[in-house]
């Protein structure tokens, strides 16, 4: 009878355990994120993966559905909100904020269906020195398929950023699996609003239809324009899905607990005004 070593199997099981339980590593890396808070988020693998094969985790928080009598018609489906953090791996506070908001959604979902993706760029985030770009050196927020991407995105990178390696848009639109995961989610899940959390400019940006929120907590609206390949351009301008871009004041520190809650309440107020008319 042939004999097989158990070492490869043990390594495989260890890798599977790590993939299934990202919280120990994330809680060590992210500011103001305890292991308990991360575990309460109950992340689930989306089925998509990063360049290096790391699972892209998400968490859905659904609005309660009423129990209906046989003769009753179901109410309209709740509106959907997609919340993304950690698109740039070195913006640690953006991922941490999304974890805190998952907890808030469990308490005050406000009749909405939520999908949270706290760490869109795990390859950049989990490096010893986190990077803005993914494992291919691509800025994911310049990799979305905006109109005339082949012409405009490389030209912008060359002329406006002077070939800044932190802002390389990649060899082609949607060349990166992390960006494809977002566009696939937008196409299949059909969010009514996208919220993308970044840092460290301390402002609130907005792209697309509808009236933008004027403030979230201490962050005030200050539109910075659109860029070739950006999510705001792709989602807000091209697809017509409002994109709220939050720029936290610090990439390595979260706002206080009270500030994060106030931002959440301000977001709910704006969503109620815009989505439930």
Image (spheres, helix red, strand yellow):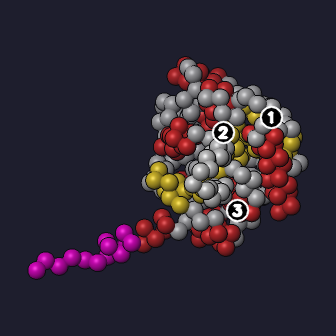
Distance in Å between CA atoms under marks 1 and 3: 25 Å
Q: Is residue 35 visible?
A: yes
Distance in Å between CA atoms under marks 2 and 1: 14 Å
157 is higher (above) or lower (below) than 46:
above
Q: Is residue 218 left or right of residue 86?
A: right
Tell me the crowding category of disc 3: few under 14, some 14 to 19, or many 20 or more residues within 10 angstroms, Cα based.
some
**Any mark on residue 124, and which?**
none
**For this rendering, which residue is in front, 188 or 95?**
188
Q: Is residue 272 left or right of residue 128?
A: right
x, y percentage for residue 86?
A: 64, 50
Instruction: Write down the quadrant of residue 6 in the picture.
Output: bottom left
x, y percentage for residue 64?
A: 66, 58
Under tag 3, what secondary structure?
helix
Residue at screen point 83% across, 46% down: 269
User: Which residue in the protein does label 3 denote?
Assistant: 106
Quadrant assignment for the C terminus: top right
Under tag 2, what secondary structure?
loop
x, y percentage for residue 170?
A: 52, 34
User: Which residue in the protein does label 1 denote?
Assistant: 212
54 is higher (above) or lower (below) than 179:
below
Tell me the crowding category of disc 1: few under 14, some 14 to 19, or many 20 or more residues within 10 angstroms, Cα based.
some
Residue at screen point 48% across, 56% down: 54
Write down the region rendered in magenta.
1-13
Q: Is residue 121 left or right of residue 202?
A: left
Under tag 1, what secondary structure?
loop
Of the residues under marks 2 and 1, which one precedes in the sequence? 2
User: Which residue in the protein does label 2 denote?
Assistant: 192
- Please say if the residues under marks 3 and 2 sit with CB atoms less than 8 Å apart: no
Q: Is residue 96 visible?
A: no
């Amino acid at each position: 009878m042939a004999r097989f070593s158990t070492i490869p199997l043990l390594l495989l099981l260890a890798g599977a355990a790590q993939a299934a339980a990202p919280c120990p590593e994330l809680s060590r890396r992210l500011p103001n994120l305890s292991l308990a808070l991360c575990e309460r988020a109950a992340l689930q693998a989306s089925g998509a993966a990063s360049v290096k094969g790391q699972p892209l985790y998400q968490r859905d928080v659904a609005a309660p559905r009423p129990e209906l009598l046989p003769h009753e018609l179901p109410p309209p489906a709740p509106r959907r909100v997609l919340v993304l953090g950690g698109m740039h791996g070195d913006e640690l506070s953006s991922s941490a904020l999304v974890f805190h908001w998952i907890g808030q959604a469990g308490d005050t979902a406000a009749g909405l269906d939520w999908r949270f993706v706290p760490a869109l760029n795990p390859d950049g985030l989990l490096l010893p020195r986190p990077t803005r770009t993914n494992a291919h050196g691509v800025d994911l927020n310049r990799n979305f398929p905006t109109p005339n991407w082949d012409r405009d995105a490389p030209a912008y990178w060359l002329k406006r950023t002077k070939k800044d390696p932190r802002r390389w848009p990649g060899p082609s639109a949607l060349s990166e699996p992390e960006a494809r995961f977002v566009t696939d989610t937008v196409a299949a899940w059909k969010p009514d609003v996208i919220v993308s959390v970044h840092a460290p400019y301390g402002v609130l940006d907005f792209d697309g239809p509808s009236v933008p929120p004027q403030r979230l907590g201490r962050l005030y609206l200050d539109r910075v324009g659109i860029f070739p390949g950006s999510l705001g351009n792709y989602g807000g301008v091209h697809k017509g899905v409002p994109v709220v871009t939050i720029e936290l004041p610090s990439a390595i520190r979260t706002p206080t607990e009270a500030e994060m809650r106030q931002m959440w309440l301000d977001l709910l107020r704006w969503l109620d005004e815009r989505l439930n008319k």
